[in-house]
Amino acid sequence: MLGKISYNKHFEDIYYCVRIISRFFCHRIPERTFHVKGRYFPVCSRCTGLYIGAFLYLIYVYFNYVNYSRLLILIAILITIPTILDGLTQFIGSRESNNSLRFGTGLIGGIGFAILIKGFNG
């Protein structure tokens, strides 16, 4: 029982720190954020997708060689466009997105942004 209590306290401390840090990178509007058992994710649905997409791509390139050609850079730019359009059209008020769409566009956008970062940083 004592182990479970310290684990939960440790998890609570980590969760609190992540939420504080994430304020600088994400709006974290509750209606635009996934939640599990009443607990909101530290970042919104789009940012969740961005981080997961970038992380998955970085895992992929760790195990596989990727040639950062001009074509791949162009593809990376193109796959970030849906993320930018989804965020921009929602920001200017022309439409309302939903969390699934935010996550999906964020996921492919995260892959695109990771390709661009890796491609330009070598």
Image: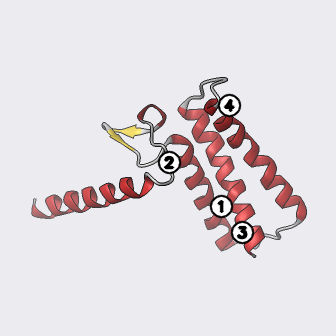
Residue 11, horizontal then vertical, whole percent: 27, 59
Q: Is residue 23 left or right of residue 7?
A: right
Q: CA distance from mark 2 to mark 1?
A: 21 Å
Q: Residues within 10 Å of mark 4 (few under 14, many from 20)?
A: few
Q: CA distance from mark 1 to mark 4?
A: 27 Å
Badge 2 or badge 1: first in the primary sequence = 2
From the image, tell me which residue sits under label 3. Answer: 118
Amino acid type at circle 1 is Tyr
Badge 4 or badge 3: first in the primary sequence = 4
Q: Is residue 41 left or right of residue 68?
A: left
Residue 24, horizontal then vertical, whole percent: 47, 54
Amino acid type at circle 4 is Thr
- Disc 4 or disc 3, which is closer to the eye? 4
Amino acid type at circle 2 is Cys
- Disc 3 or disc 1, which is closer to the eye? 3
Q: Residues within 10 Å of mark 2 (few under 14, many from 20)?
A: some
- Disc 1 or disc 4, which is closer to the eye? 4
Quick one: 22 or 38, which is closer to the camera?
A: 22
Badge 3 or badge 1: first in the primary sequence = 1
Q: Residues within 10 Å of mark 1 (few under 14, many from 20)?
A: some
Amino acid type at circle 3 is Lys
- Disc 2 or disc 1, which is closer to the eye? 2
Residue 107, horizontal then vertical, whole percent: 62, 47
From the image, tell me which residue sits under label 4. Answer: 89
- How many dots with numbers? 4
Name of the residue lying farthest toward the right: 70
- Label 3: which secondary element: helix
Q: Quadrant of residue 115?
A: bottom right
- Label 4: which secondary element: helix
Q: CA distance from mark 4 to mark 2?
A: 17 Å
Quick one: 62 or 29, which is closer to the camera?
A: 29
